[in-house]
Image (cartoon, rainbow, N blue to C red):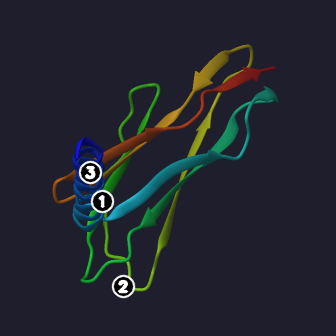
Amino acid sequence: MLKLKIRVSILGVLALATAAALAWAENNPFSRVDIKENRGRYVGACPVEIVFRGYIQLNQPRQALAFNYHWTRSDGATGQVKVLQPPLNQTTVVIPETWTLGAAGQHYDVSETLWVNSGNTHLNVTSRTIPIDCR
């Protein structure tokens, strides 16, 4: 009898976990947010252009989706908040951000953070730190 109760309890926990995951997916329009950079390190003449690309994977929406985003830089600068309304069939949004910086003889360690918001969902992801050595 004890084995049966434990088995029923485990099944109950799994059912609750599955229901919670489904509810989260329905309420969270984003399945993944990631950043990729066009270089991992730079040594050379400056200024140099660094391109960050935010990749936002969307949960398949059942209705129209609108969300806002903005970038913040490791030097404290904050970009303008922008609003997107992707088409219903779009599953990935790519958001580029270009940063041109540097002066001869200077060293920088730079990164950017992408902030994504929709309804009660507020996410952010920070890029890798990129060392910049200007000659």
In depth, the one of 56 and 96 nearer the eye is 56
Q: With respect to residue 40, does 89 lie above or below?
A: below
Q: Say if mark 1 contacts mark 3, CB within 8 Å.
A: no
Q: Nearer the viewer, mark 2 or mark 3?
A: 3
Identified at 52% across, 49% down, the residue is: 34
How far is disc 2 from disc 3 in space, using C-alphas? 46 Å
Question: Which amino acid is tagged 1?
Answer: Thr
In depth, the one of 114 and 74 nearer the eye is 114
Residue 88's disc is: 2
Q: Estimate how packed mark 2 is, as few (under 14), some (14 to 19) or many (20 or more) residues with alpha carbons within 10 Å.
A: few
Label 1 vs 2, first from the N-terminus:
1
Residue 4's disc is: 3
Image x and y of residue 14, in percent:
30, 54
Identified at 33% across, 54% down, the residue is: 69
Q: Estimate how packed mark 3 is, as few (under 14), some (14 to 19) or many (20 or more) residues with alpha carbons within 10 Å.
A: few
Image x and y of residue 3, in percent:
30, 45
Q: With respect to residue 66, does 90 lie above or below?
A: below
Residue 18's disc is: 1
In depth, the one of 53 and 1 nearer the eye is 1
Mark 2: secondary structure: loop
* Residue at the farthest front position: 1
Q: With respect to residue 75, does 59 lie above or below?
A: below
Q: Nearer the viewer, mark 1 or mark 2?
A: 1
Q: In this view, does 107 lie to the left or right of 24?
A: right
How far is disc 1 from disc 2 in space, using C-alphas? 25 Å
- Dividing the picture into quadrants, the one containing residue 58 is bottom left
Question: Which amino acid is tagged 2?
Answer: Leu
Identified at 44% across, 41% down, the residue is: 125
Q: Say if mark 2 contacts mark 3, CB within 8 Å.
A: no
